[in-house]
Amino acid sequence: MASSVQATTAEENKTAGVIFLAENAKKANIVTTASGLQYEVLTKGTGAKNPEATDTVTVHYAGTTLDGKEFDSSYKRGEPTSFPLNRVIAGWTEGLQLMTEGAKYRFYIPSNLAYGERGAGRDIQANAALIFDVELLKIK
């Protein structure tokens, strides 16, 4: 999961993401969507429907940078989080709509479907590709 590339600038981050995702796409268990989002199914869901972008979902998740540094985790906080699906990064909005309740996926999100050129705080640099393990607990 970790990348040997230690990117420090926005352009280096973008290049590192492109290289990582190109290599990752070659793995048998990785699915790449038309937008460039990559995912793998860790646990199949037991739910009967997929959420729509206008639904509110409850999830557990952990997010890391390509070098394996965890920047956020609902697991570590000890409680899941809920949000309207159309109010998060595009990679989450797209990816969660592929899931059913009970599913756990790993998303490999290119920078343009994450925080893009603006980054997010000190832990997510500009143009960073991100990795999230996401467990869909409930669709409201």
Image: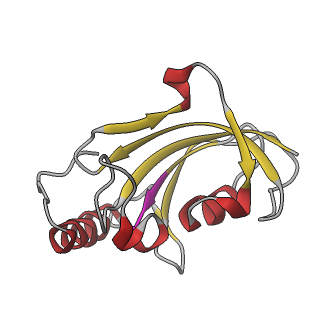
Residue 30, percent from left and from top: 44, 59
Name of the residue lying farthest toward the top: 78
Residue 32, percent from left and from top: 48, 70
Q: Quadrant of the N terminus?
A: top left
Residue 6, percent from left and from top: 11, 54
Q: Is residue 52 magenta?
A: no
Q: Is residue 88 above or below residue 135?
A: below
Depth order, front residue of 103/132:
132
In the drawing, does residue 99 fall left or right of residue 104? right
Quarter where residue 29 is shown? bottom left
Depth order, front residue of 4/73:
73
How many labels sit on residues?
0
Quarter where residue 12 is shown? bottom left
Depth order, front residue of 87/134:
87
Q: Main secondary structure of the magenta part?
A: strand
Quarter where residue 101 is shown? top right
What sort of colour scheme is used for the picture? secondary structure
Name of the residue lying farthest toward the bottom: 34
Q: Residue at x 21, y 70 (%)?
A: 10
Depth order, front residue of 117/54:
117
Q: Residue at x 36, y 43 (%)?
A: 64
Q: Is residue 86 above or below residue 36?
A: above
Q: Residue at x 70, y 52 (%)?
A: 99
Q: Is residue 109 magenta?
A: yes
Q: Is residue 35 above or below residue 80?
A: below
**Which residue range is magenta in the image?**
107-111
In the drawing, does residue 77 fall left or right of residue 122? right
Q: Residue at x 33, y 53 (%)?
A: 124
